[in-house]
Image (spheres, helix red, strand yellow):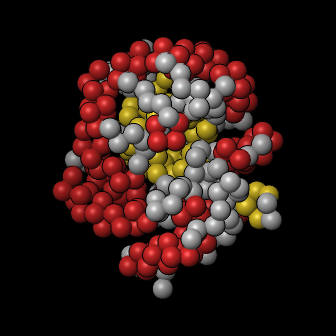
């Protein structure tokens, strides 16, 4: 049996910038806040961390910093997927050397690989490393989705641990859970679907909202893991308006604004992303106010 990398809530942590550069001191504070807030794992250099706009040196410095600050208190998972298989292999090897516990590898965007191509792509990466891979299926960003049959094939690889499913395709999710062995773990990739996916057999969420409400997302997933789905549903609904506001513009624009509202200087996103529109920012602030997060 493959070990489960984590159960519960993993934060897809933001990358704070100051004057165009990574603010490592601010990053340290964000990581520590997450651990104190009960977060079950930290995902660095993912979509929310703006990995697509980080150069190689920045990316590796951030991953190494995260590993050092976390100091084995929770698992560290690092994004290492690109749309170039050879580059993904090189980045995955370097990231493994930095001491992370697992890799998050997105479906190759833009290329629009066949399902056979996806199997080959992920298998080549998994063959090149000795730590677990979490697949990342997010067709709204990549233009391609894995099928349940593809997951079934990939689940046979000893280094492929599971998938972050951000398609919100519940037929796909159910078929995947039916086809794949119990040690192929499925995590929600969308905060709004956490309870529903865990009711089907998912083991947690890789969360954007946990940047803002780490304790609540941890508690939500723990309720699900304890089969207390009625209580989880109440908490999921209480967080619904905040989660919706965090995705009123493309992630991570709203979550970085929310971090700034909380007094954690996350800076602004790098181009081509821009500052949040004022009307959307006001609405986000209102939802944070309603939850007592800001005054």
The reply, left or right, for residue 18 in relation to residue 216 is: right
The reply, left or right, for residue 131 in relation to residue 160 is: right
Give above or below for 5 relative to 67: above
The answer to whether residue 293 of the structure is visible from this angle is: no
The reply, left or right, for residue 224 in relation to residue 64 is: left
> Looking at the image, which is closer to me, 27 or 245?
245
> Looking at the image, which is closer to me, 167 or 34?
167
- Residue extending farthest to the left is 230
Q: Position of residue 38 (x, y in %)?
A: 47, 57
Give above or below for 176 relative to 42: above
| Residue at the image point whose x is 59% and y is 26% from the top | 111
| Residue at the image point whose x is 58% and y is 61% from the top | 253
| Residue at the image point whose x is 61% and y is 75% from the top | 263
Q: Quadrant of residue 79?
A: top right
Q: Position of residue 118 (x, y in %)?
A: 51, 20
Count of numbered circles on the image: 0
Q: Position of residue 147 (x, y in %)?
A: 38, 24
Image quarter where the N terminus lies is top left
| Residue at the image point whose x is 63% and y is 67% from the top | 275
The answer to whether residue 108 of the structure is visible from this angle is: yes
Q: Position of residue 82 (x, y in %)?
A: 64, 32
């Amino acid at each position: 049996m493959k070990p489960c990398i984590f159960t519960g809530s993993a934060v897809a942590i933001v990358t704070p910038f100051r004057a165009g550069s990574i603010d490592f001191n601010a990053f340290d504070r964000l990581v520590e806040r997450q651990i104190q807030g009960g977060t079950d794992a930290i995902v660095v250099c993912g979509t929310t961390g703006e990995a697509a706009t980080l150069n190689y040196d920045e990316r590796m410095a951030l991953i190494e910093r995260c590993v050092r600050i976390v100091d084995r208190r929770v698992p560290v998972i690092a994004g290492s997927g690109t749309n170039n298989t050879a580059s993904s292999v090189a980045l995955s090897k370097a990231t493994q050397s930095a001491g992370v516990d697992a890799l998050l590898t997105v479906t190759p965007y833009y290329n629009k690989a066949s399902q056979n191509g996806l199997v080959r792509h992920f298998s080549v990466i998994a063959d090149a490393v000795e730590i677990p891979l979490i697949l990342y299926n997010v067709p709204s960003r990549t233009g391609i989705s894995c099928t349940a049959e593809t997951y079934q094939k990939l689940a046979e690889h000893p280094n492929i641990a599971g998938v972050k499913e951000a398609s919100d395709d519940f037929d796909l999710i159910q078929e995947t859970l039916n086809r794949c062995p119990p040690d192929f773990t499925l995590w929600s990739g969308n905060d709004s679907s956490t309870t529903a996916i865990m009711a089907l057999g998912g083991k947690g969420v890789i969360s954007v909202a946990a940047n803002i409400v780490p304790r609540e997302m941890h508690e939500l997933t723990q309720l699900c893991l304890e089969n207390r789905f009625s209580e989880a549903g109440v908490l999921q609904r209480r967080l619904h308006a905040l989660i919706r506001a965090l995705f009123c513009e493309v992630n991570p624009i709203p979550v970085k604004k929310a971090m700034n509202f909380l007094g954690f200087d996350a800076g602004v996103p790098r181009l081509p992303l821009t500052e949040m529109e004022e009307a959307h920012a006001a609405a986000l602030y209102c939802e944070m106010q309603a939850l007592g997060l800001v005054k």
